[in-house]
Image (spheres, rainbow, N blue to C red):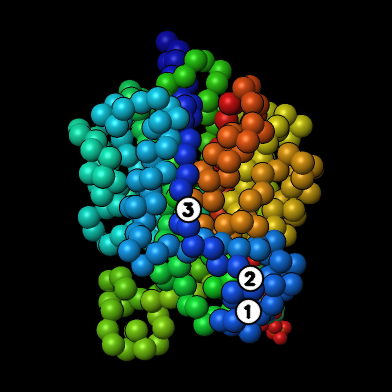
Amino acid sequence: MEVKFKSVGIVGTGFCVPKKVLTNFDLEKMVDTTDDWIRTRTGIRERRIADSNEATSDLAGKAARKALEDARLNPDEIDLIIVATLSPDMSFPSTACLVQHKLGIKNACAFDLEAACSGFIYGLSVADAFIKSSTYKIALVIGAETFSRIVDWKDRNTCILMGDGAGAVVLREVINGKGILSTYLDADGSGADLMKQPAGGSRLPATEETVKQGLHYFKMQGNEVFKHAVRIMTASTITALKKANLSNEDVDWLIPHQANSRIIQSVAKRLCIPMEKVIVNLDKYGNTTAATIPIALDEAVKQGKIKEEDNVVLVAFGAGLTWGACVLRW
Ligand code: COA
């Protein structure tokens, strides 16, 4: 007997970024860098930074409300909440539970998912499987970060890259042939040292010494990450397209993780996808980690770029190493 799974799609999107803008010119006053260096090496012009009283759940909650309004749903109709983040309000309880409370959602399963910059695609894939299997009906998947809290503002190699923000989507059953056509997730823990926050966990709990040594800050081997990112995002896109029985020529929109415009251009070139079909907004927000893709998706939908029946590919890589891609028919 053939088992027929439900089709699951995105029925609402929203995003929220903090008001405060930090430009490359502001960074020139903080570290030994220039606007020209940052723009030409990364494509970033400015990023948003959370206020001292603003945490990840605040940005996540605002993005989620917008996604719910867009989907014309009441908070009560949500029965699954996934927050993809590596900068939660605190280790526990989960940011997803805090968001649930903020939105007044009752009777929902809520948890955080940590897959760094790939977290949103991991979250989509998990929610897709839960809804397909009829375990839950309507899911909120949120990518949210206040990465500025773990950035070393004296390290020019990393502080110029990151920003804060949140993006959210609502997922539910849609008509057959639309929605998520395929997902592909992968990881390789042998690359764990390439990007990490060494202290603050069970390996190196917070002590005066770990704070003194700056071990609670984000550390990265930028060059190595760059090479992996180009290879991994290209291969992931090809794999996810194959799983959906599509080719690169069928792609209407590519929404890559927004880490560096040179990475994005190299991936698009290798995939033979023209840059006109690639959504890029990192000039305004920098790398918002798990939030880059849902923010870019919401902007592209609201700007009228993504239209009904368009084939959209989301692709990301991040610390772990983790990576993944998702093909959707809008
Ligand atoms: N301003 C000015 N100079 C800088 C600088 C800055 N902000 N940051 C680094 N430099 C210097 C370096 O010190 C180095 O100087 P040197 O040659 O005298 O040693 C020089 O610029 C080149 O550094 P390099 O690291 O080779 O530059 P790059 O072209 O690789 O760009 C990154 C650096 C970080 C922008 C790039 O490697 C990158 O984007 N990597 C991927 C990062 C990423 O995506 N992370 C998130 C993953 S989810």
Q: Position of residue 76 (x, y in %)?
A: 26, 29
Q: Classify 318 as above or below 134.
A: below
Q: Classify 107 as above or below 157.
A: above
Q: Which residue type does callout 2 highlight?
A: Asn
**Residue 195 visible in the displayed image:** yes
Residue 17, which numbered label? Answer: 3
- Which residue in the protein does label 2 denote? 24
87 relative position to 164: left or right: left
> In terms of secondary structure, where does tag 1 sit?
helix
Total residue callouts: 3
Q: How far apart are labels 2 and 3 at the CA level? A: 18 Å
The quarter of the rendered structure image containing the N terminus is: top left
At a point 32% along the width and 39% down the height, the residue shown is: 81
What is the quadrant of residue 315 in the picture? top right
At a point 26% along the width and 45% down the height, the residue shown is: 102
> In terms of secondary structure, where does tag 2 sit?
helix
- Which residue in the protein does label 1 denote? 28
Q: Position of residue 29 (x, y in %)?
A: 59, 81
Q: Classify 163 as above or below 154.
A: above
Q: Classify 91 as above or below 173.
A: below
Ligand 1: which quarter? bottom right
Q: How far apart are labels 1 and 3 at the CA level? A: 23 Å
Q: Are marks 2 and 1 in contact (CB under 8 Å)?
A: yes
